[in-house]
Image (spheres, rainbow, N blue to C red):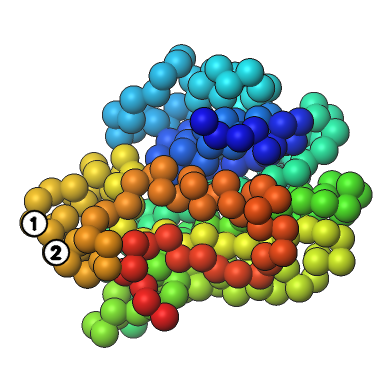
Amino acid sequence: MVERKLTGKVALVTGGSRGLGRAYVLRLASLGAHVVVNDIDLTAYKEFNEQISAASVMEEVEAYGVRSLGIEADVTDKAAVEGMFQRVDEEFGRLDVLVCNAGGALFGRDNPWAATASEEAYRKTIDLNLMGTIFCCQVALPMMKRQRSGKIVTIGSQAGMKSGVKGGSGPYSVAKAGVIHYTRLLAGEVGAYNINVNCMAPAWILSSRAIAQGRAEEATRKELEAQIALGRLGMPEDCAKVLEFLTTDLSDYVTGQCISVCGGYILF
């Protein structure tokens, strides 16, 4: 049974209505936190037939005996982000945990090469992954500074830590590398306020989107597993366990770090 280390705390997870984001939401709720679920579409779990245990993700949270609030907002729109955090302040009066999960390699998948990817692919991918993270952190910080405490977890990727010898995944890799370095910079600036800022960088995780895109197919799975020290693909819960470390007192003396959750795909 999970120890409820976050009882009475308030958490917000962007991109929280499916996949890894939903796993983070439910882990935080199981730890006793009240959870604000943000997504551009709070029914996004339906897109890839992800099965949930209640009528909504917010109701799944409430099953843990905590409060939940769902807010549909686009994290690439700073005004929408400001409105979201204003509502959190009005409803809860504090924010203890921010998980900047919204993102993905959603644009320009037909031409992901660094040398030739389109301007649109770069701009949209950087807006979603990097600028969305920056906006949420900037707008959340006044609340955390006011209470002189907080845990921020950004979400990078193995793509932002290493490059294949043949390149590829240009816009997404650049955006996630930016997230990782932004995390380091921000940690240095806000440590005096007792705010921890760290990054998780998942690798080959079997999220509902990844499964729909073919990651669980036998040939793909075998090819990837051969490159992973632990010999298996990750599950969303593998990342949620690391999130527990980064959002509780277990990580009180950890900040500015990027933790690769990859089963040994990245070994440096």
Residue at far top of view = 55
Residue placed at 68% from the left, 61% from the top?
197
| Residue sitting at x 52%, y 30% | 1
Q: Residues within 10 Å of mark 2 (few under 14, many from 20)?
A: few
**Which amino acid type is shown beneath numbered disc 2?**
Glu
Against 58, residue 4 (above or below) is below
**Residue at horizontal 46%, vertical 38%?**
23
Q: Is residue 128 left or right of residue 192?
A: left
Left or right of 62, for residue 267: left
Quadrant assignment, res 134: bottom right
Q: Is residue 221 visible?
A: yes
Q: Which residue is mark 1?
A: 219
Q: Position of residue 128 (x, y in %)?
A: 52, 55
Q: What secondary structure is marked by label 2?
A: helix
Quote the CA–CA distance across marks 2 and 1.
6 Å
Q: Nearer the viewer, residue 106 or 208?
A: 208
Q: Note whether 268 is above or below 172 in the view shown.
A: below
Where does label 2 land, which residue? 223
Helix, strand or loop status at disc 1: helix
- Label 2–label 1 contact, CB within 8 A: yes
Left or right: 93, with 157 as reference point: right
Q: Toward the viewer: 95 or 260? A: 260
User: Which of the 4 image quadrants contains residue 258?
Assistant: bottom right
> What kind of residue is marked 1?
Ala
Identity of the residue drawn at 86% across and 60% down: 193
Q: Position of residue 234 (x, y in %)?
A: 32, 52
Q: Quadrant of the C terminus?
A: bottom left
Give the quadrant of residue 104. bottom left
Task: Give the x, y percent position of residue 231.
Answer: 22, 61
Instruction: Mark 1: give few (<14), some (14-19) or many (20+) Cα within 10 Å.
Output: few
Q: Is residue 223 left or right of residue 22?
A: left
